[in-house]
Amino acid sequence: MMRQLGQTRHHTPKRKPYILKVLILAFIAAGLLFGLLKLFNLDKEILKGPRTVVRLVTGSGLKSDHGRVNVLLLGTGGAGHEGPDLTDTMILASIDENAKDVVLVSIPRDLWDEDISSKINHAYAYGEEKGGKGLDVAKENITKLLGIPVHYAVRVDFGGFTKAVDLTDGLDINVENSFSDPHYPIGGKEDDLCGNILEKADINGAKVDVVKTASGSAIPIAEITDQNTPFTCRYETLNFVKGPTHMNGETALKFVRSRYGTNGEGSDFARSARQEKVILAFRQKVLSSQTLSDPKTAIGLIKTFGDSIDTDIVNDNVPVFAKLANKIDPATIRKVVLDAGRDESVLQVGDPANYGGQYALIPKGTWEDLGDYINGEIFKLEEK
């Protein structure tokens, strides 16, 4: 059954105080809000408004379509990373209003977005350059591309994520496949020449920018990719071994950001699966009695995420979100991965000549077909 969902447009509200921002994290780590509220006796303050009380009791007040609330979760590199506002992680969480069914749609960063003539992972950065409207642009463009209305958005930078994982003493992750990634970028070395020289060379009668290596060879800059780069000092090699692994914040971040892993772990499908695995592990860790009963850890999480979260969820809706999130059973969460390369994939690699020479993903059929597929997956349980 095809669901025709409407499109909406929202304005970006003012940024929230740091306490509210970390409370928004409760949506990602469902249940954290209730623990923090009770721990610091903040529940009376937050719940004292009449409208909030009514919404909390009735469960109403959140924007929704066809009984589902859709939230876009974005992860950015933040300060110290190349392209600090580019979204390496994009997941659309679609939750039915009774929290009985949750669907996570992993959106590849290379999905082409014609509105900005770039990949979808540039949408937030593009919006930020247009007057701090990153969340608006990301929501509107995802709505248009996927045919799903995005009601709310939360953006977290990876710096805050790394610190938060360390505050909870790390995560226990089951690595599905051993893999290596020889091209993981090292923060702060994005512009390091690694002993090479930039100059111009005459190639086929034209002056071309090239990189002159120590061996004397000249490589046209336009032909350099992450895989054949002469700037080897900008990268490190990651190695992960199959089986249970305890990861600190830095290791967990590398695990989810790795893009060129061996053993099939370089695909969008595998990368999305790793991202979801870490998000759910973090949720479980935050919900543990050890974390919630430790005031020092709770306060640290509040301070850490104070400057790391951007959201358009307003104050009155925070307790309602927390109530909804607290009902979610992780075992029932369904996952939809948009990728290319498998027989069952719904995306394909587009001709670089049509996308400014870039590697870009587009639907195998039309964009309407892609929207039909995603809506069909989201509403699959209701159709049975």
Image: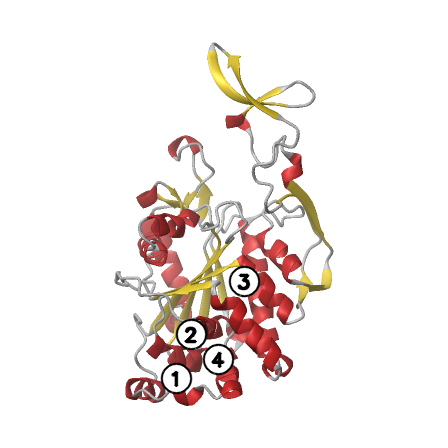
Q: Residues within 10 Å of mark 3 (few under 14, many from 20)?
A: many
Asked if residue 6 shows in the view, the reply is yes
Q: Amino acid at mark 1?
A: Ile
Q: CB of mark 3 within 8 Å of CB of mark 1?
A: no
Q: CB of mark 2 within 8 Å of CB of mark 1?
A: no
Quick one: label 3 or label 1, which is nearer the N terminus? 1
Q: Secondary structure at mark 4?
A: helix
Q: Which mark is residue 137?
A: none
Q: Amino acid at mark 4?
A: Leu
Q: Which residue is mark 4?
A: 33
Q: Which residue is mark 3?
A: 160
Quick one: label 1 or label 4, which is nearer the N terminus? 4
Residue at (36%, 86%) from the top-left corner? 56
Is residue 310 placed above or below 51 in the rendered structure?
above
Image quadrant occupied by the C terminus: bottom left
Q: Which residue is mark 1?
A: 46
Residue at (33%, 60%) from the top-left corner? 148
Foreground pick, 207 / 284: 207
Q: Amino acid at mark 2?
A: Leu
Q: CA distance from mark 4 to mark 3?
A: 18 Å
Q: CB of mark 2 within 8 Å of CB of mark 3?
A: no
Q: CA distance from mark 4 to mark 2?
A: 10 Å
Q: Is residue 282 left or right of residue 89?
A: right
Q: Which residue is mark 2?
A: 20
| Quarter location, residue 119 | top left
Q: Amino acid at mark 3?
A: Gly
Q: Give the percent coordinates (x, y) of residue 91.
A: 46, 60
Foreground pick, 262 / 304: 304
Q: CB of mark 4 within 8 Å of CB of mark 3?
A: no
Mark in the foreground, 4 or 2: 2
